[in-house]
Image: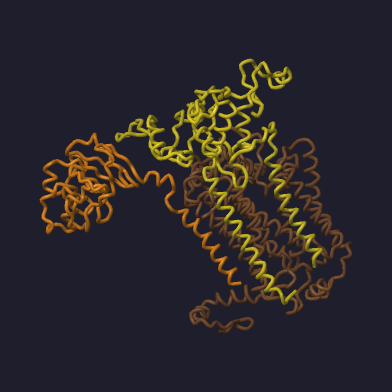
Amino acid sequence: MRKPFARKLLVSGAIALAALATGTVAIAAGGVEHPPARKWHFQGPFGTYDRAAAQRGYQVYQEVCAACHSLSLVAYRNLTDLGLTENQVKSLIKDITVPDLNDEGAPADRPARPADRFKKPFANEAAAAAANNGKAPPDLSVIVKAREYGPDYIYGLLTGYVPYDKLTPEQIKEFDVKKDDYFNKYFPGHKIAMAPPLADDKVTYADGTKATTAQEAADVTEFLAWASEPHMEDRKRTGVRVILFLLALAGLMYAVKRVVWADKH
Amino acid sequence: MVATGALGAVGVAAVAWPFINNLNPAADTLALSTIEVNVTPIAVGQAVTVKWRGKPVFIRHRTEAEIKEAEAVPMAQLPDPETDNKRVTDTAKKVRPEWLIMIGVCTHLGCVPLGNKPGDQKGEYGGWFCPCHGSSYDTSGRIRKGPAPKNLVVPDYLFTSDSLVRIG
Amino acid sequence: MASSHGTPPVFNNKVISWIDHRLPIFSYIEKEYHTFPTPRNFNYFWNFGAIATVMLVLMIATGIVLATNYTPHVLMAFDAVERIDRDVPQGWLIRDLHMNGASFFFIAVYIHIFRGMYYGSYKAPRELLWILGVVIFLLMMATAFMGYVLPWGQMSFWGATVITNLFSAIPVVGESIVTWLWGGFAVDNPTLNRFFALHYLLPFIIVAVVALHVVALHVHGSNNPTGIDVKGPQDTVPFHPYYTMKDGFGVICFLIVFAGFVFFAPDYLGHPDNYIPANPMVTPAHIVPEWYFLPFYAILRAIPDKLGGVLAMFGAIAVLFVLPWLDTSRVRSCTFRPIYKWFMMLLVVDVIVLGICGSKPPEGFWVPLSQLATLYYFAHFLVLLPILGKIERPLPLPPSIADSVLKKKAV
């Protein structure tokens, strides 16, 4: 009984593995230079978001990215997930006004409320494109889930700019780089429309963290990872419980099955 | 075997919950379950209608005469007896007779009564009048005549300052 | 309590017995899921029918709840799905279950199909049972395809565009059919709206065909690993508790793996591009279907001719319908077919190779490889299977199922 069964198990295992492998292959086939893998606080089955880093990242987003990039799926109230109190959120948005209609139906700005989604820098996609040389800056709400290598790519992109005079002649030739083009190591096709957004001391952190370019990039990536999946910690916590429960149930089911079959083997 | 059955039952119950919970109001809906209204622009004798939890809320800045009239009504004349004082008290127990805040939904069959806009028919008791089946409410929003069984509902509200009221 | 066959069960509970006398649902359950004689020698491959059923129920239950929060409109669909993820209470859980559930439903069904092929479960008298199974598989593919369009990401949009355009290969009327499918001149709001309606409908049709599949199964009973017929009561055990408990254990084990993906890698089987809202003006650099379609996608691209590719792809599924008549062997189970057994394994490898080819851009050595694999796929069914049945000498079959079980025990 043992041997053929073991072989069958192997076969079914192989099928499952192959299915997974195909999945991986499908994802891996993109043809961009791999951004280096970094260690993130939210990685792994028990990883959580680093609240302090994400709060700093919010500051970077708000002071730097928000001038061009919307974050349309996130509401101001969501910032309480990052450890801010309701009053802190209210004071953060006290100067922001958002477009709405007045009682007569005419467009009019009103003060932002915590229930509002993050204000968009442009009225619509066409306006965003018109203001940015014809290409609208992408919304950043799910950007970490929408790119291969997720957070590594975002960090790589933000820190991966190469100045024109540091490029090799081969690179300039191959990618047809002009003097005023921006060259990025990890952007598909390398020529990117976005000017290097970050620089040392571009923001001043309230908690005293030194605002190097790398620090800013890591912080804003942490923030954007959170924005992409605010419920991640809940998901992992639930998962641990569900799997422990299923393992216990499987053990018991196996025992019951053995008892039931005892007279037939 | 009993343990397995019990554990299985627990599992089924635990699985059922997310499916039921899914139909509860979502976070974005809940975020709109309280609203703040600035009452400074509402002059004496005027009223505004604001939308709260999908329903109209009437905020009326009552005149001295209207307050007097509401306070003077004997309880025996009311189908749903309630003092005016009680209807203008916020959740911090502070009484502000000049501000009457009510959900603008007739307690008969859910129409929105007239009387909040200047020029609206106010009914014979000077408050609100429901055009659907002719219920008349007084200047305290209490039912006086017609098929509606109850007074207009006063929601929980709190004046966080003299100019700002939080409803819900 | 007259019943047309067998001894009627006696119910002690008066209510049950009253109902059963008028509508014999309890007798039916008793007969088909309790006392039903089932071969005693199933291996764990026989769990996958039950597992697939559980996945179907899970998909319908999660799907109904998702539909209550979803909006099928091109301007709102993407945000509606994200709102389910972000704001709806435990919406993320239901969505992750549904999204990964599709993959795991296909995993279960693919293993179920493999089991049917390896042990010859499609042969007389179970041909219709098999054909109903292929119908379920086709309906699943249609349902999964339309479901993938609903989040209205880039892969949704371009997947829908490419797959519906397959029909334009049909001579003369092709273009009109595509316009009819779209309800317009491109994949747009009418397409999304009708795909949502059909995505909601088809699972219930699947349930109906599954019911027929089970009715057909219970006419002659299940096949078994030896492929020989049940000869008497010593060959069988009652379905309950023997297989209810074994299936229960198998289902839980499968769910553990499933939960691993749902909770710790929910986006692993998906594609990042589907988190980019659909944009009819920009095609992603490399579009791939969901993994479970990849082998068929590879066959489509292996043929350097539009109509030919489409025909080959549909042919790859059509050939399964006639499988019972392509196999000429008198022996059912591969256990006793020393040569075909290896070709069966080769077919599994072949389908995996096709899957990998389908995920690669159609260039370089992937093109001849996918052509070779496509060739084997069809040769396996159309050439090998009919010929091998005639020339292969099967191993001696055990005299009975009970015999084979007892012999294994002795070893």
- At 73% across and 38% down in the image, what residue appears? C362
Residue B154 can be seen in this image: yes
Structure colour scheme: by chain
What is the display colour for chain A?
yellow
Foreground pick, C127 / A7: A7
Expressed as whole percent of the image width and height from the top left, the position of residue C5 reads 63, 81
- At 56% across and 29% down in the image, what residue appears? A216
Foreground pick, B11 / C101: B11
For residue A165, side relative to residue B132 (left or right): right
Q: Which chain is orange?
A: B
Foreground pick, A103 / B26: B26
- At 62% across and 19% down in the image, what residue appears? A181
Does residue B13 sit above or below C26 in this rendering? above
Quarter placement of the N terminus of chain C: bottom right
Quarter placement of the C terminus of chain C: bottom right
Does residue C212 sit above or below B113 in this rendering? below
Foreground pick, A30 / C208: A30
For residue B42, side relative to residue C288 (left or right): left
What is the display colour for chain C?
brown
Q: Quadrant of residue B148?
A: bottom left
Does residue B164 sit above or below C20 in this rendering? above
Expressed as whole percent of the image width and height from the top left, the position of residue A262 reads 71, 75
For residue B4, side relative to residue B121 (left or right): right
Expressed as whole percent of the image width and height from the top left, the position of residue A157 reads 62, 29
Residue C185 can be seen in this image: no
- At 75% across and 42% down in the image, what residue appears? C303
Expressed as whole percent of the image width and height from the top left, the position of residue B110 reads 28, 53
Give the mark count: 0
Q: Quadrant of residue B34?
A: top left
